[in-house]
Image (cartoon, rainbow, N blue to C red):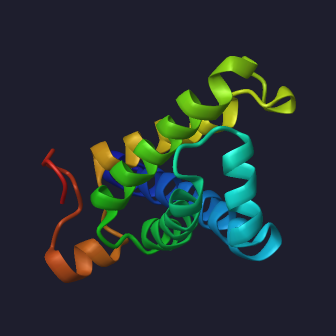
Amino acid sequence: MNQPTLTTTARTILRIVTGFLFAAHGWQKFNEWTIAGTQAAFAQMGVPAANLIAPVIATLELVGGVALILGVLTRVFAVLLAVDMLGALFLVHAAAGIFAATGGYELVLMLAAAAVAVALVGAGKLSVDKALFGRTGSKLSVLV
């Protein structure tokens, strides 16, 4: 494979897998845990304004994840999702150490890093952003 093809493939895989994981977590907050359950869990974890934050985070993760999969407003959603994960890291997981099995931050750190990477490189050629705006993210820009 040539370099442009590898870059397109790598961007697409990163964007879709990251989006899928975020969408799955958002879906889980709505359907498995329910918003009321997510609010209670957030409150128990010490998240400020848990009743307001829980539905916002669930929606961001579900909608933002789908947006990454499609490659629409990719950089905007990637930045928002990175901030979401950094909040989870510092508010909830940092004190528990690295490993997720003990409530640690390994998953949220990896998701934050993946979201930052997507924000930096953009959506790529196989995206709605490219189809609608002609933008692939090949030039570093602030948000789109």
Give x and y (percent) for residue 52.
Answer: 51, 62
Q: Is residue 61 above or below residue 97?
A: below
**Residue nearer the viewer, 78 or 33:** 33
Q: From where the camera sits, is residue 22 visible? A: yes
Left or right: 133 in relation to 53: left
Give x and y (percent) for residue 84.
Answer: 48, 47
Left or right: 72 in relation to 107: left
Left or right: 124 in relation to 49: left
Residue drawn at x 52%, y 66% is: 65
Give x and y (percent) for residue 3.
Answer: 34, 45
**Residue nearer the viewer, 114 or 134:** 114
The number of numbered discs placed on residues in the rendered structure image is 0
**Residue nearer the viewer, 32 or 126:** 32
Residue drawn at x 67%, y 49% is: 42
**Residue nearer the viewer, 22 or 117:** 22
* Residue ranking furthest to the bottom: 132
Q: From where the camera sits, is residue 109 visible? A: no
Quarter assignment of residue 70: bottom left
Residue drawn at x 26%, y 73% is: 129
Q: Is residue 84 above or below residue 53?
A: above
